Image: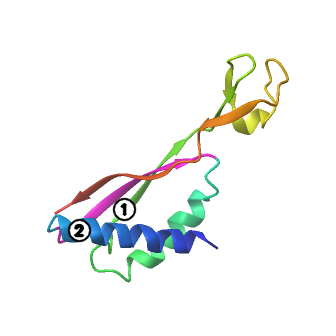
Amino acid sequence: MHELGVVFHIIDDLEKVGKENDVEKIHSVTLQLGEVSGVVPKLLTDAWNWAAKKNELVDGAELIIENLPAVTYCEECGCEYETVAHGKICPNCGSERTYLLRGNEFLIKEITAT
């Protein structure tokens, strides 16, 4: 389960931000998680709940996950479409000249702290 490693990385980032801003306690963390980021939200939440208890700065902090849909762009016809529903092949023209516009994000969007 690589989600636990991801959580440890998030906590490391939060500790750095906390030190830079004289934060004593983090109450919530909002993540933006792309649909095709490779991270499973349920597993991430479970890992967070376990790991946060072991760190004074984030113990009891709520993890809020904003899911971002994956969107692909077709260079052939200019169409934007849902990546998960159609994959790499454009549903409009059938071209494989496509690329992911968004949906693989993994970002800390917001932290509430005291």
Give the residue drawn at x 58%, y 61%.
42
Left or right, 30 with respect to 105, comes to left
The kind of residue on which mark 1 rests is Glu
Residue behind mark 1: 62
Q: Nearer the viewer, mark 1 or mark 2?
A: 2
Q: Give the percent coordinates (x, y) of residue 59.
A: 32, 75
Q: Give the percent coordinates (x, y) of residue 85.
A: 75, 35
Q: Which residues are magenta?
A: 23-35
Q: Secondary structure at mark 1?
A: strand
Give the residue drawn at x 78%, y 33%.
86
Question: Would you call the spot at circle 1 few (<14 residues within 10 Å), some (14-19), or many (20 or more)?
Answer: some
Left or right, 45 with respect to 85, comes to left
Residue 43 lies in quadrant = bottom right
Left or right, 29 with respect to 72, comes to left
User: Against 108, is 57 above or below?
Assistant: below
Give the residue drawn at x 73%, y 16%.
77
The N terminus - image quarter: bottom right
Left or right, 48 with respect to 26, comes to right
Q: Residue furthest right?
A: 94
**Dominant secondary structure of the magenta stretch?**
strand
User: Against 38, is 82 above or below?
Assistant: above
Residue behind mark 2: 18
Q: Residue 106, can we see it?
A: yes
Q: Is residue 64 magenta?
A: no
Q: Residue 48, can we see it?
A: no
